[in-house]
Every structure is written in structure tokens, then in C-alpha cells.
Amino acid sequence: MFFVYCRAMNTTKLFCLFRWAVVGFLLLWFVTHAVGQSKPDAGWPNYGSDPGGTRYSNASQIDRSNVAQLKVAWTYRTGANDQPTKLVGKAAFEATPILVDGKLYFTTPYDKVFALDAGTGAKVWEYDPGVNLQRNYSEVASRGVSAWHDTKRKRGQPCRLRILFGTLDARLIALDGETGKPCLDFGTNGEVNLNVDAATQTEWTGGYQVTSSPAISGDLVITGSSIADNWKVDTGRGIVRAFDIRTGKLRWTWDPIPWAKDTKPRTGAGNAWSTLSVDRERDLVFIPTGSAAPDYFGGIRKGDDKWANSVVALRASTGEFVWGFQVVHHDLWDYDVASQPLLFTWKDGTPAIAINTKMGHVFVLNRLTGAPLLPVEERPVAQSDIAGEQSWPTQPFSTISLVPEKFEPSDAWGPSPADVQWCQEKIKASRSEGIFTPPSLQGTVVFPGNVGGVNWGSGAYDPKSHLMIVNTNRLVAWVKLIPRDKFDEETNKNQDNRIYGEFAEQDPSAYGLYRTFLFSPSGQPCNAPPWGTTEAVDLFTGKKVWDVPLGTLVPGKETGSINLGGPIVTAGGLVFTAATMDLYLRGFDSETGKELWKYQLPAGGQATPMTYTLNGKQYLVIAAGGHGKMGTKQGDFVLAFTLP
């Protein structure tokens, strides 16, 4: 063919061949770069997409115009529910897979690790850490793994790619990303025992665990812990530790509540159970911490309890304290910082951080100093009337508040007049003086409740529109303190209440606890819907841009649903999230919040999805295994969606 062209152009065969080679090269470059690969394949190498937890993808093949065409590309089943264990009632498949070198890596609720081919969903390998499933654990969940490439090792050498994760029984494990075998040079035969030096209680070691993926900075792997903090005061130390990622040797330890060693008994927790964020360029790691133990009585842990209920910036290489910001002083409401700190760039180029909270407050700070970029005000709040308790006189309030902060008898709601009346009488008989009303002997209305606002699903951030997208819960909790000498009598007398709530000993403090959510006799919340939303807020101005009900608890009505799991946002102008009790995975327009697509999952989607492009094709992936405590349908599915 090209020789015919050469004769027509009256040129030599050699020169013509050269010209055709050049034309062919330019044509190939144009096709692969200008058309098929105008952007490089979009990955998802971290639990939150990037180390700063933006949950953003530059993938744009799936967009507003074609999202309704999404179909299932492949499905994988882990077999997790085939294991005989009494833990099924607690199990929650909360994992978000990560994409590294063409493989998806994730964990099941029981800490099995899987590697799948990202294009086909075929299993490459699986690893079972041998967690004793006949023991009791506070939580039965694992949100995922982290990955690290060892640039000092050549391709083909063992553990050049390391997959790291924590377990229900508090081990930190390193696996070879190619084979799934333990990296034997890490710790002892590939694992580090995190119970060491953590002062865990021998009578229930299942109260000290790891449920979130560790952070990676340089050659360090950094992890916190999940601690059951209502059963005792002295539950275990909420320390954060960094280990050499090659050897497993401890490099540094940071204690969020060093003052706890002077309380009697020693106060535990203050732990970082959610996902840490890392600014590798500035050698910073950001630690979200929970309440010091126990959650609802602070008579032993007097003061403001720094640095519990905070986000703290540490020098990642040394563990040195840089700055801290406390979102709740002397927590009495289980207002842990459950969300991963979100790192973004402020409008004037300042490195910034957004802190989402269970209260619905969003604090926007300078990432380098902790100074507020949007105003924060300390306001007086209601005070405790419990003997031995000294609640903090003020609490920080942000410019951004995502959910309602008070609940009065006139706010009571129900599907029938009898339900409304029941709710009103319950509120009238309780303390209910707005957000931060302290626990009491007669009972206290807590709004938002302990799973209110933004939970571990965290936020997603679109750098183009500077919109942060979050899922929120709007549930009213009810909390009652029980004097120690009456606790056993109260729990024995009210066995039926265990079905609807939780008795917690808070031993050996002066008060035990009963907590529940405020539902009327019909089984629906006492506050008006929506009970769950997805909303967008402009982080540059602090203004809410849109707010829509997420799912439903009443078929045919837009009530919004109680939800656990987070959103992601893409360059295609889309927000994807599941999280609801109605089992749907949804796609929204990121500019307006309009629902554009939904798919009913085979089990509850109490996980955050992820997306990537591979070989020019964009995939959307979610774990669907349900949530035992939440009561959604359980399963063992991983589903991938793509365009036809």
C-alpha cells in the first residue's frame, strides 16, 4: 500500500519508508495520547484514594451523561460467611479495596486478605492470619490495607511490594504483594504484636484491636487502635506507634493522654481508631482521636482531657508533637473524631485540613499550624448535675454545622399521634438543652447522637469545585447514668432494654450507663426525617451548596436512611455512595445532588466505594457484605461496575 503512495509522490522507496515510519509513529502517539490516553490510568492506591483522604478520582469516563448505563462487570465472593463463628451478628464488611500494580487488595471482617485481578475479579491469592473466631471482640470489621513499594529491592525480589494491615486480635502484619506470603523480615515471622506495651486488659483482650488501615510515611508504618472504652476506665493505652516498615522495629510512640498515668485507676483509650492522614511532603501525620475512657462519665479524668477528641499533627519521622486541635473538651457523649482528616489546598494556596465530626461541626484549619481558616467560637454549654462530674464550661463551634443541634418536645415526630405523644413525654422527662447537654440520672437527649454527623465514612473533596461531600446521620440518642450500687439491679430488671440499647459498666467509676436511640413504639425515629443525607459544602466559604436525603427507611418516601460508609467524587462530575439500610449504591450529580443512577446490592453496602481506570476502562467497585450491628443484609460480595 505504502509503495503505491510512494510512486504517486515520485520518491525513493527508502525515503518513503522513512516518511511512513514517521507518520505511523505520530499517528500512534496521537491515538494513545490524545485520544485513548488523554489522562493516565486513574488509580486508587490508598484507602482514601490519596494519603490525605480526599476520596477523589480524576477518572472521567463515567460521567453524568452515561452513568445510567452502568452494568455489573464482575462479582467476587470471599466466602467469609461460610466460617462457623458466633461473631456473624457483629460482622461488618467495611473495606475499601486499593489498586496497586493492577491488583485489588482488601480485607474481610475476619481479617482475611484478598488480591484480585482488577480487570476480571479473578482471585490471585488470599491470606488467612488465623484470628481466633471463637473469642469475643468489640468490633468485627476491617476497613482495608495499605501498600508500600521498597525501592531498594529489585523487581522479582520477595516483598518488594508490601501489603500491611492490622487485625482483630491486635497484630500488625506485612505480606508480599505478589504472593500473599508473610514478609518474614518484618517483626516475628511477618507480624508485630501490638498488645505489647499497650496495657491491655487480660480479662478481655478482644477490646483492643485494629480496624482501620495503617498509614505509610517514608519507611514507616503508623497505626493506632480500636478500644472498647465503655466497659472499664482502665481499658488500654490509646497510643499511636510507628514501626520500621522493613524490620517491624518500633521507631516511636505517641501517647494522646499522658496525664492518664496519674489518674486512679489509670484512664485508658483516647485512641485513634479511624484512618490517619499523611502529608509526606511536609513530614506530617494527622491523628484523629476518640474519647478517654469511659465515654459518658468523666469524674476520674478531670480537666479538658487533651489530646482526646482531637486531631493532632505529629512529625511523621519522629512522632514529635507539632500542633493539636480539640473538637470536644472533656467528652461526655462518645463524640470521637471518627472521620479521616481531609487534606486540601485553601483558596490562597495555604495547605489546609478539614475535620469532620459526629456533631456535624466541620473545622477548617491551617494544616501547618492548626489555626482556624474559618471562624471557630467557644460558647457556653449546659453543665452537669452529677455528683463528682465537672463538665467543661464551653465547647468549640464551627462556621460549618451540617446537622440540627437541638431537640425539644415541639420537634417530636411520629407516623401517628400516639407516637408523637410518646416522644414528647420522653423528651419532657429528660434533660434536653441542646447539643452538649450532659448525661443525667433521669436521662438526657443527645442530639446529634453518637453515630450522628459524619462517621468513619469521612468526606470526599473535589479540588475543582472546592466542594466537600459527606454522608450524615441525624439520629437522637438517649443516655442515662446509673449509680454503681444500683447498676446490677437496674440491668437485671430491664433485660428487654438490652434488645434496644446498651448497658455499659464503666467500671469502677461511680456510674454505669444505659444508652439507646430515641425511637417511638412504631419503631421509627422520634425526630422528623431526613434521618440520613448526602450533602455538599463549599470549604472556601463554609456555605452548604446542596443537601439531599440518602436512601430511605420507608419504601416510597424520601426519609433518608441511617447510614455507615462514605462517598467518593470523580472528575466525571459524580458522587458515588452506598451506606444505607435500603441496600442501594447510588450515583449523584456532584454539582446539584440530583440522583442519576442506583443499583440494589445483594447485601448491605456499609463500605465506601472506589474507582479506577485500567487499560482505558473505568471501573466502580464496592464491598457489599452488610453490617451485623446495623442489621442490614449480610453477604460476602465484591462488585465491579463499568460501562457497556
Image (cartoon, grey):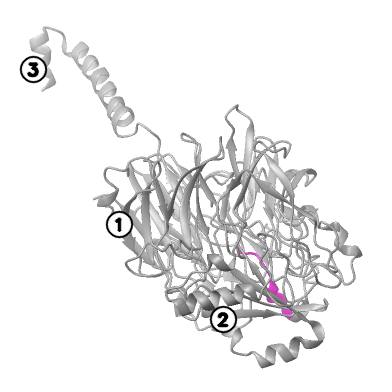
Gap between marks 3 and 2, in whole Å? 84 Å
Q: Quadrant of residue 491?
A: bottom right
Q: Residues within 10 Å of mark 3 (few under 14, many from 20)?
A: few
Q: Earlier in the sequence, mark 1 or mark 3?
A: 3
Quarter placement of the N terminus: top left
Q: Which mark is residue 4?
A: 3
**Residue at x 25%, y 20% (from the top left corner):** 21
Closer to us: mark 1 or mark 3?
A: 1
* Residue with the mark numbered 2: 500
State whether residue 131 appears in this view: no
Residue 15 vertical position relative to residue 384 in the rendered view, above or below: above
- Which amino acid type corresponds to the residue marked 3 in the rendered image? Val
Rendered location of residue 576, percent (x, y): 40, 52
Q: Residues within 10 Å of mark 2 (few under 14, many from 20)?
A: few
Q: Earlier in the sequence, mark 3 or mark 2?
A: 3
Q: Residue furthest top?
A: 10
